[in-house]
Image: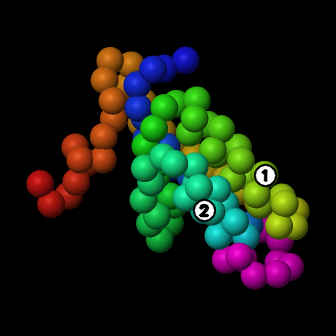
Amino acid sequence: MIDKNIQLAIQVVPLDREGDVYDKIDAAIEVIQKSGVDYMITPMETVMTGPYDKLQEIARNAQEALINVGCREFLVNIKMHVRTDRDVTVEEKRLDR
């Protein structure tokens, strides 16, 4: 679809109360960590930078990881910054510049 790097922020919120909620979130984060894309974990979401299709695949795999660890109900919030003419970069968004 788009051949430039984008940013995708994903937040997963397990709603079922069985087990440790952070273990479920960590399963989704592990998918991102193993994906090979640049990412930043923040207190509220994880932000990834990379090709559009790859990030969509990672977001889908993170949701599957929740299911695989027994999460039966969850919310997923996704935000994307997309440009068609050039890459979206972390550097341009730094607060200390």
Mark 1 highlights which residue?
64
Residue that appears at 30% across and 40% down: 89
Asked whether the viewer can see residue 27, the reply is yes
Q: Give the class, few, some or many, for how many residues have Cα within 10 Å of label 1's Cα (few <14, many ≥20).
A: some
Tag 1: amino acid? Glu
Q: Is residue 24 above or below residue 78?
A: below
Q: Residue 60: image x %, image y %?
A: 70, 43
In the rendered view, does 52 fall on the left or right side of 21? left
Prevailing SS of the magenta stretch: loop
Q: Residue 6: image x %, image y %?
A: 42, 34
Q: Residue 26: image x %, image y %?
A: 65, 70
Q: Is residue 15 above or below residue 54?
A: below
Q: Secondary structure at mark 1?
A: helix
Q: Secondary structure at mark 2?
A: helix
Residue that appears at 67% across and 77% down: 22
Mark 2 highlights which residue?
29
Based on the picture, tell me whether residue 18 belongs to the magenta stretch. yes
Q: Is residue 24 above or below residue 90?
A: below
Marked residue nearer the N-terminal end (2 or 1): 2
Based on the picture, tell me whether residue 57 belongs to the magenta stretch. no
Q: Residue 50: image x %, image y %?
A: 45, 38
Range of magenta residues: 15-23
Q: Quadrant of the N terminus?
A: top right
